[in-house]
Image (cartoon, helix red, strand yellow):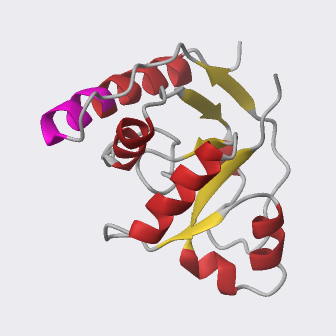
Amino acid sequence: MARPVAFMAKEELFDVPLLGQAIRLYGAYPVKRGSGDRGALRAALNALEDGWLVGIFLEGTRTQDGRIYDPKLGAAMIAAKAQVPLIPVGLIGVEQIFQAGSKLPRPVPLTIRIGPAIAPPQRSKRQELEAVTQACQEQILALLAQGRD
């Protein structure tokens, strides 16, 4: 069954003319990075209640090679509050879309790999959130290691 995906995006993107309107049309909602943004948490939970999937980048940003080095606990916290599984997704090639110094995205081939669901934490205790986040990180890294084949 096809379901739309709501993505968390840094709030600064919503101030960019046209881009802010476009990403809202596609279901994005703003997040204040570097803090516990209750509005973003509420938006994610509302999207899940409305039948959407919620896409969250574990590290909270893109990395130069697309790998995850410092995962945050937000995805596990949302999964715990909503009691929904996490679906690890490896996006291969995304890091090539925006090159250093370029203001426009480049068309590049992407490979999307989807792993098996990970059960949500039963509670929002830090130790449980960390364990589920680590399991998700390990699955995503394994998906990325498969490459484009």
The magenta region covers 125-132
In the image, is residue 91 part of the stretch drawn in magenta? no
Please tell me which residue is depicted at 52% across the width and 51% down the height of the picture. Answer: 45
Taking 64 as reference, is 17 left or right?
right
Residue 122, visible in the rendered structure? yes
The image quarter containing residue 52 is top right
Please tell me which residue is depicted at 38% across the width and 30% down the height of the picture. Answer: 137
Could you say where residue 99 lies in the image, as x and y percent from the top left?
Answer: 66, 61
Please tell me which residue is depicted at 56% across the width and 16% down the height of the picture. Answer: 115
| Nearer to us in this view, 36 or 141 | 36
Could you say where residue 4 lies in the image, as x and y percent from the top left?
Answer: 77, 42
Magenta stretch: dominant secondary structure: helix
Q: Quadrant of the N terminus?
A: top right
| Nearer to us in this view, 109 or 137 | 137
Q: Quadrant of the C terminus?
A: top right
Residue 95, visible in the rendered structure? no
Image position of 87 with respect to 55: above or below: above
